[in-house]
Image (cartoon, grey):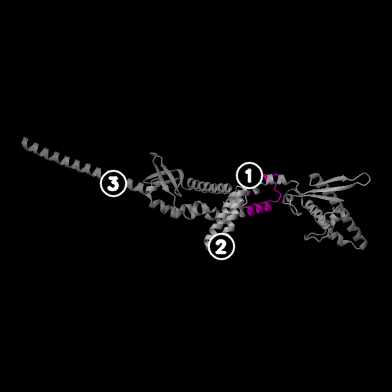
Amino acid sequence: MSLEIKKPRFSPIPIQPWLFRYLTGNEMKVVSAILNYADMKDRTKNSFPTNRTILFWCGFDLIEKSNSSNAKNTTYEKYKALKTEEERTKFKNEKIKYGINTVKAIKRSLIEKGILKTEIVGKKGKQSVKHILDLEWKKEQYINEYDEYFNSITPAPAHEKEEIKKELENLLKVADNVSQDSLTNKLKELYEKSKDLTGEKSFIVPSEDIDKVTDFIMDSNRVKTKIQDGKISNKEAYKKAIKHSIENGTYNGIEETYTKLVKKEKEEIFSNLETALMHNEPTVPYMKNILNFGSLRFTNNIYIAKYINSSNSEKIDFIIGLEKIKNYVPTATLFTKENKELLENYEQSLKDYIEKPSKKNYIDETEKLEKLNEKMLNHQISKDKQKEKLEDLSQANKQNQILDDYESS
């Protein structure tokens, strides 16, 4: 039987990645056996293996000892329990017969799926079966379903590529007379320029955030739906592939994905802090009054809580200190680099906010207290002056009364 292999242009014969996505383990064994046998036969007209050959190449005839503790009913135990050589030979033949039927069933499955096709060729009386193994089967579907691995790259104009090539040649000619730093910087410039021409993005995920953004992608609705629908059969392998593409800078749309993750974390920090204040500190005492929690704001890298006096609707801002951040927000190491640094540098942000009053968006509580004390002090001074005036007026009235009594006498 002859064999024709359809494969991507200039591609070697090994298994293509999309086959792992759509074939079962036994189907992959049979395809591998067909390819390896074809290589051994130099892909001549008799390069398609028989069912018996495929059986041996796939190991369907093996009688292996099970690692299971309960191995009494395994094939190996059944074989070992046989007493005569005749019984054992018969058992092996039955195993081979069963294996051949397995190969036939798998070949039918491959034909039904479309990766393996058969054709009758030759004239009547001299006809033979030609098998066609299509290694490009499901390729387009694979690319569409896993589009995050395939960037749409527009080829750069030939003259621009030539310019970069000439610059690199000239640079290498004078490399001995150029400092190491200058040479490094120039090579970086050429590298970035070449990436711009190929359409590659220069955004790189911080190394400490690669696992976090990988988990974020795996938790997305798009990936979860594919897992539920069975489009992603090996979850761990898929996750490793995503991480690898992020590390290599080839994951399509990684900058947008990473930005979404950072934003989501900021919202989680804000929500955790707001919820904690609402439940743990719904009210606070202030100047013989009880204030109720109103809202939370984020400005200048710090958080400010607004509390409201229910008696007069006065709104007062309280800066959220470092202690509350430690108590109410998860540890900084759980977040991406940007949000981790925000939490780790929170104390410094507080100092910067306090030291630059002219740049504040909200009134500092210390300022407010000082203004309130000053107002109360002025009010007290005013009351003291009024009291002095009343006392002077009362004294004058008494003196007038004495004079009136003296004159009437």
Q: Which residues are magenta?
A: 218-245
The residue type indicated by label 2 comes to: Ala
The residue type indicated by label 3 comes to: Leu
Question: Would residue 278 be counted in the magenta stretch?
Answer: no
- The residue that disc 3 covers is 377
Main SS class of the magenta portion in the image: helix
- Would you place residue 86 above or below residue 246 in this image? below
* Cβ–Cβ under 8 Å for marks 1 and 2: no
- The residue that disc 2 covers is 175
Quarter residue 112 falls in: top right
- The residue that disc 1 covers is 221
Going from N to C along the chain, the mark reached first, 3 or 2, is 2
* Cβ–Cβ under 8 Å for marks 1 and 3: no
- Near-viewer residue (158 or 389): 158
Residue 42 percent coordinates (x, y) = 82, 56
- Near-viewer residue (15 or 224): 15
Going from N to C along the chain, the mark reached first, 1 or 2, is 2
Residue 204 percent coordinates (x, y) = 57, 53
Quarter residue 58 falls in: bottom right
Circle 2 sits in a helix, a strand or a loop, which is it?
A: helix
Question: Would residue 221 be counted in the magenta stretch?
Answer: yes
- Compute the Cα span from label 3 to label 2: 77 Å
